[in-house]
Image (tube, rainbow, N blue to C red):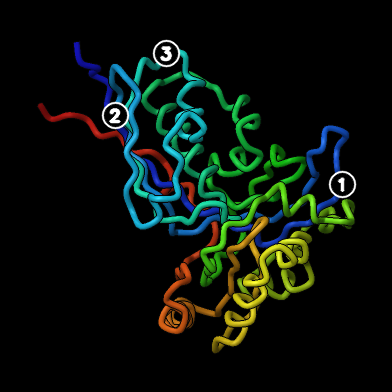
Amino acid sequence: MADQRPAVEAFAPAKINLTLHVTGQRADGYHLIDSLVVFADVGDRLRIAPGDAFSMTVGGPEANAVPRGGDNLILQVARLFDGLQGAGFDLIKDLPVSSGIGGGSADAAATYRGLSAILEGLDRSAELLALGADIPMCLHSVAARVGGIGEEVDPLPELPALHAVLVNPRRAVSTPSVFKALVQKSHPPMPKTLPTFKNAQTLVAWLAEQRNDLEGPAMSLEPSIAEVKTVLASQQNCLLTRMSGSGATCFGVFPDQESAERAALAMAQTHPDWWVKAARLGSQSARARPQLIRSTT
């Protein structure tokens, strides 16, 4: 008998580290972080249909780089749900892989949200951290201060939204390699109590005083990151540039949507081989909420 449970569609927004302070290293090798994380209104799209077997299709402009085997995070998350006999996963991949914006983790989090909506009452969230340190912060796609190794997520729903341009030079960067290249493992965290940001301007001014401690190591492994930042900074009205995560994606902050879109168009024209997207950064919890698709037959 065919599975009568509804299918779902879920949006997997890009994760952006506005700050990333590496504050130490545990005995097991995991690094401790203090990071201000937001999400973009650009991302991947996932459709999940319950069935009798597991299958996966991948489309979209970034599909070729997505692993299809058992190491794919979507399928690993699916295996956490004991009551699931099978499901078809259709992923539209718009985010570049290994790019510091949580593409695989965002897809994994979207998978978890979608399956939780289908399999009501089941909670496997405690097991997500073992699959990837970025997955817990991507689970609700809300602006947050993230600590520990990524499992401590303190939502900041009132954080002002920012207009930005996201740029990746299409150079995959290995996160373990970047952390290995980080010579100093302990840096100061952000202030214990974050200031109240009245608007985007006050947030940007404060961000300029913060850091991404992985920028230097990432640039030593992939010099094109420095070029991306330089080109971003040269765009009219650019207020701030920084690398996200372990790279190589960087972001530039702009005063309004028009300025961001103008800069994105200019960079896409001068560097057609780069991945360039204008985006709004903030909380994306509403868009990330899975939508049930019930059959009309």
Q: Is residue 196 visible?
A: no
The residue depicted at 81 percent of the width and 53 percent of the height is 22
Q: Which residue is mark 3?
A: 83
Q: Residue at the location (74% across, 73% down)?
A: 208
Q: In the depicted view, which residue is nearer to us: 216 or 262?
A: 216
**Residue 49's disc number:** 2
Q: Position of residue 4 (x, y in %)?
A: 23, 18
* SS for dot 1: strand
Indicate the quadrant where residue 147 lies.
top right
The three-letter amino acid code for the residue at tag 2 is: Ala
Q: Percent from the top left, x then y, of residue 264?
A: 45, 77
Residue placed at 35% from the left, 24% from the top? Answer: 54
Distance between mark 3 and mark 2 Cα atoms: 14 Å
Q: Nearer the viewer, residue 200 or 263?
A: 263
Question: Which residue extends farthest left?
Answer: 297
Corner quadrant of residue 244: bottom right
Front residue of 42 and 175: 175
Q: CA distance from mark 2 to mark 1?
A: 42 Å
Quarter occupied by residue 101: bottom right
* Callout 3 amino acid: Gly
Location of the N terminus by quadrant is: top left
Residue, disc 1: 24
Label total for image: 3
